Amino acid sequence: MNVGVQLYTLRKEIEQDFIGTLQKVKEIGYTGVEFAGYGSFTGKELKDVLSDLELTPVSSHVPITELENKLSRVLEFGVEIGLQYIVCPFPKDSQGGKRDYEELAESLNRIGEACKRAGIQLCYHHHDFECVRFDGEYALNLLLARTNPDFLMLEMDVYWAQMPMYHRPNICENTPIVVPSFT
């Protein structure tokens, strides 16, 4: 079975020694990685490092502002290193209101369509703050109901998913939950 690691978990180690941390990840037995930044590497340099270490670049967390303002560059880099998924890890304002989530959905639809054309699937990584309600509807449900499931998948965070707030009735009701995987 292929098992990957979210490098955000190792952000301090990555900051200190990017390649050394990737080497340790491989030694531990991981076969895939999810990035949260690429250090100062070019796409080709990083692709070569990953190839040498026999690590699969599964996905990368990319801030929404970068997705909105630098999407061409994000996609070019992602295609070059072989990403399967790009993940929006956070809305612009976690304390935002209903209109903020509606605007985020519109933006993610546009971004997701461009990702799809590039051969990469866009995902959204949830947290606890999407459990706030607007007119009786959870923010996460509002977001997912207003996005095209062909353009956006939910990267289920198992930490938040096991928290009591996600065991409430109607959270993610009628929403396909997909845990991205890789081969």
Image: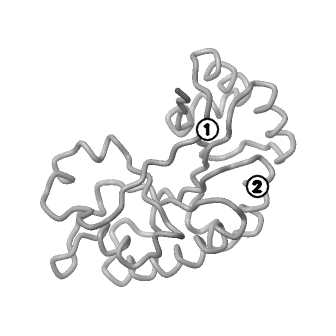
**Residue at the outermost left position:** 169
- What x and y, as percent, mark residue 80? 81, 51
Question: Residue type at mark 1?
Answer: Thr
Give the quadrant of residue 13.
Answer: top right
Q: Relative to 31, does residue 150 appear above or below in the rendering?
A: below
- What x and y, as percent, mark residue 132? 23, 67
Of pointers 1 and 2, the one earlier in the residue sequence: 2
On the picture, is 90 further left or further right than 31? left
Pick the residue in front: 183 or 68: 183
Total marks in image: 2
> Which label sits on residue 99?
none
> Which label sits on residue 79?
2
User: Image quadrant for the C terminus?
Assistant: top right
The residues tagged by marks 1 and 2 sit, at their Cα atoms, a distance apart of 16 Å
Pick the residue in front: 43 or 17: 43
Pick the residue in front: 43 or 145: 145
On the picture, is 82 further left or further right than 170? right
Q: Tell me the residue that label 1 is attached to.
A: 183
How many residues crowd mark 1 within 10 Å: few (<14), some (14–19), many (20+)?
few
On the picture, is 50 further left or further right than 90? right
Question: Residue type at mark 2?
Answer: Val
Q: Relative to 173, does residue 145 appear above or below in the rendering?
A: below
- What x and y, as percent, mark residue 92? 47, 69
